[in-house]
Image: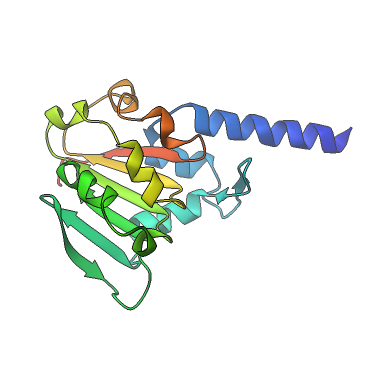
Amino acid sequence: MKKILTTSLTLLIVCVVFAQGFQPIDNYMKNNGNSGSEISTMNSRNVSGTELKSLAYDLHPTLFFSNGALTQRYKETKQPETIQSDAASLGSVARTNASLLRDVKLLKVSLNQPGELGSTFNANLFKVLPNVKYILVETSFNCSEAQLNKMIPEAAGKEIVWVYNVSSDQ
């Protein structure tokens, strides 16, 4: 009985976390293991607020895309763990050699104007990012979770954590 209850509670937590779409990054980290605990998804991928915080704010091997092209690579000797891209460059990310992107866990996308909310994440993007766990959208303008949720394609998969941050100093 205890095992069934624990399993049911874990599935409930996973469904709540992954079925909601975008949420503020601070809320996610506060509510989902910023202390180091992890949540196992149905396909055994662990996600935690601590991991997301590290990937989003610490230095990791990173690919930088801007204006439709790969512009820079941080720590070239290691496989990239994060990608930073503007909205216009997501197509370029999707056309990048998949072997280069196999260890990417975080895709950070900057939206600089409200018109970029109309675009969606191309389903091909997730084919070249098989291990992505987190999508972080940073905006320099106010927007709603409902507007951001329209950007999520059905083909993205339920195991991705979608978070956002509104910043006035991007």
Residue at coordinates 51% horizontally, 33% vertically from top-left?
A: 18
Residue at coordinates 48% horizontally, 56% vertically from top-left?
A: 51
The colour style of the image is: rainbow
Q: Is residue 7 left or right of residue 122?
A: right
Q: Is residue 140 left or right of residue 83?
A: left
Image location of residue 145, percent across then percent down: 33, 25
> Which of the 4 image quadrants contains residue 138?
top left
Q: Is residue 31 left or right of residue 169?
A: right
- Above or below, 100 relative to 28: below
Image location of residue 43, percent across then percent down: 62, 44
Q: Is residue 142 visible?
A: no
Image location of residue 139, percent across then percent down: 21, 38
Q: Nearer the viewer, residue 39 or 107?
A: 107
User: In which quadrant of the rendered image does the N terminus lie?
Assistant: top right
Q: Which residue is the extreme one toward the bottom?
A: 77
> Which of the 4 image quadrants contains residue 140?
top left
Image location of residue 89, percent across then percent down: 18, 47
User: How many labels sit on residues?
Assistant: 0
Residue at coordinates 56% horizontally, 28% vertically from top-left?
A: 16
Q: Which residue is the extreme one toward the top?
A: 146
Q: Is residue 113 visible?
A: yes
Q: Is residue 62 left or right of residue 42?
A: left
- Above or below, 86 relative to 82: above
